[in-house]
Image (tube, rainbow, N blue to C red):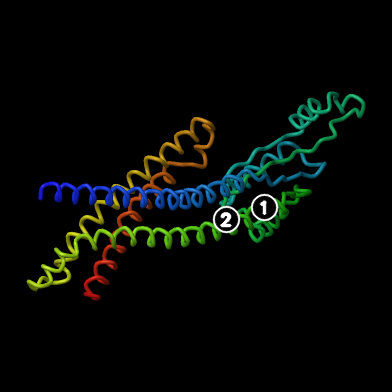
Amino acid sequence: MGKKTRKGHEGRGWQVATLCVSTALVLILLGLVVFIGLTANNLSDYVKENLTVTVVFRDNVTNREAAVVCRKLQTRPWVAHLEYIDRDRALKEQTKALGTDPSEFLGTNPFVPSAEINLKANQANSDSLKLITKQIKAYKQVSEVTYQKDLMDKVNSNLHKVMLIMLIIALVLTCISFSLINNTVRLGIYERRHAIGIMTLVGASWAFIRKPFLKTAVLEGLIAGVLALLVLAAGVWALYIYEPDIQAIVTWQVIAITAAAVLFSGMVISTICVYISVTRYLHNN
């Protein structure tokens, strides 16, 4: 009798381990989907905020007049960063780039003042840029406004595609996880069918019978979530070591949301699968 009980505990232990590991593997994939989705959004914002809108002033505009316009532009709500480049700085930069000073043979500084504007991420789209360009050109000192329209459109288009792909993958993985966990749970219920049968005969309610299974499911889901987070944390740590600048994209908010999503998904998926499996078994018996 002792050997039989010990074998039963060992079998149950293997089932719990299998359930936790299989759930953890699914949660790792789900965590990656959430992580990539959030970082893709941050990457998009990072790229958008580093796209430059160049404001070129007219040839007859003095450095002082151009600086006044730049100060006014800097107060606009769509400006994340503005860098003013006066005539002298433009000459120095071009002299360094060309290896010769154009003013020496031209007799005058041929460059005009300009400004490079980085927009806030939520304003870096075609519709907003049309309005922003119109507002900048309203200043009579401004000659031209240029920006990389094609690159901006591609960034926005690619973000939508990435988010759609991530959503599809998340749905597929969720279905797979339900199938894997459900099969493991059914084996556990089958092994305890005699205990369930006895409780049914003595008049125990379905809620009473389900309760211990649901408690165990929450615990197993939590364990699986922790295992998945350990693997994901190791991956993020390796990513930080390999590329320290990734912190601008992989923020603590991303890590916190991913961790919460993994733990919550582990407990919810396990609980729902157990609830469905136990209810189905009780209904069929």
- Classify 10 Å Cα crowding around label 1: few (below 14), some (14-19), many (20 and above): some
Direction from residue 232 to residue 283 in the image, left or right: left
Q: Which residue is drawn at 49% across and 50% down?
A: 38
Q: Residue at x 41, y 39 (%)?
A: 233
Direction from residue 205 to residue 109 in the image, left or right: right
Q: In which quarter of the image is residue 61?
A: top right
Q: What residue type is labelled 1?
A: Met
Q: Where is residue 251 in the image (x, y as percent from the top left)?
A: 46, 42
Residue 78 image label? none
Q: Where is residue 238 in the image (x, y as percent from the top left)?
A: 47, 33
Q: Mark 1 points at which residue?
A: 152
- Which one is nearer the viewer's eye here, 121 or 154? 154
Between marks 1 and 2 in the image, the one whose residue lies nearer the viewer: 2
Q: Distance between the residues labelled 1 and 2?
A: 16 Å
Q: Position of residue 272 (x, y in %)?
A: 30, 64
Q: Position of residue 28 (x, y in %)?
A: 42, 48
- Classify 10 Å Cα crowding around label 2: few (below 14), some (14-19), many (20 and above): some
First in sequence: mark 1 vs mark 2: 1
Q: Is mark 2 on a helix, strand or loop?
A: helix
- Which one is nearer the viewer's eye here, 157 or 17? 17
Q: Mark 2 points at which residue?
A: 162
- Which one is nearer the viewer's eye here, 119 or 193? 193
Q: Which amino acid does label 2 sit on?
A: Val
Direction from residue 125 to residue 86 in the image, left or right: right
Q: Residue at x 80, y 30 (%)?
A: 94
Q: What element carries label 1?
A: helix
Direction from residue 262 to residue 110 in the image, left or right: right
**Quadrant in the picture for the C terminus:** bottom left
Q: Residue at x 27, y 72 (%)?
A: 280
